[in-house]
Image: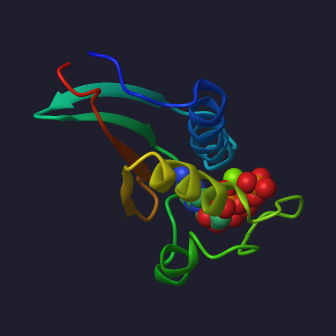
């Protein structure tokens, strides 16, 4: 994977939020997959879990600050992650299926000339 131009601590925080959410979605254990891919001038990083997925209502509210379904959640993880990625000129896409799991994909611009 060619380099991306990013603040390493912020990027790690964004990835860690997605990894923690994936782990939380699999309370009985499961598979966490982290994959990277180059797509033209973009770097793609996807975090997948085969956990419980989400309801339509949850999916609609994911990125809204303080929306949480967890007893000890702040509901700020995804809002903050999205802010970090947007500030880096990227975007987040996701897919989810109830009872099957979810995938969150971060897209970041590759360093110019990479
Ligand atoms: N991988 C996932 N699978 C299922 N639901 C998810 C997943 N990621 C996020 N969610 C849903 O989105 C909600 C918001 O996520 P967010 O990371 O913003 O907050 P949180 O995880 O609840 O709290 P915190 O990040 O502070 O621990 C979660 O409470 C959960 O309902
Ligand atoms: Mg979270």
Taking the spot 49% from the left edge, 74% from the top edge, the residue there is 59
Q: Position of residue 90 (x, y in %)?
A: 37, 49
Q: Which quadrant of the figure shows ligand 1?
A: bottom right
Q: Position of residue 58 (x, y in %)?
A: 56, 76
- Which quadrant holds the C terminus? top left
- Extreme residue in the right direction: 72
Image quadrant where residue 11 sits: top right
Taking the spot 37% from the left edge, 54% from the top edge, the residue there is 91
Image position of 37 with respect to 56: above or below: above
Identify which residue, 68 or 82, lies in the foreground.
Answer: 82
Taking the spot 63% from the left edge, 36% from the top edge, the residue there is 10
Q: Is residue 6 left or right of residue 20?
A: left
Taking the spot 57% from the left edge, 58% from the top edge, the residue there is 83
The color scheme shown is rainbow
Image quadrant where residue 20 sits: top right
Q: Position of residue 113 (x, y in %)?
A: 17, 21
Image position of 53 with respect to 47: above or below: below
- Extreme residue in the left direction: 40
Image position of 43 with respect to 113: above or below: below
Q: Position of residue 61 (x, y in %)?
A: 57, 79
Identify which residue, 44 or 24, lies in the foreground.
Answer: 44
- Which quadrant holds the N terminus? top left
User: How many numbered marks appear?
Assistant: 0
- Extreme residue in the front direction: 112
């Amino acid at each position: 994977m060619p380099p991306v131009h990013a603040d390493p601590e912020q990027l790690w925080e964004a990835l860690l939020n997605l990894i923690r959410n994936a782990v939380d979605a699999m309370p009985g254990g499961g598979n966490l997959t982290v994959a990277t891919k180059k797509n033209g001038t973009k770097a793609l990083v996807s975090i997948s879990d085969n956990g419980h997925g989400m309801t339509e209502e949850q999916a609609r509210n994911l990125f809204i600050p303080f929306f949480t379904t967890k007893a000890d959640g702040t509901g700020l993880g995804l809002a903050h992650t999205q802010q970090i990625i947007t500030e880096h000129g990227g975007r987040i896409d996701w897919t989810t299926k109830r009872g099957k799991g979810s995938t969150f994909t971060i897209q970041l611009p590759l360093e110019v000339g990479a």
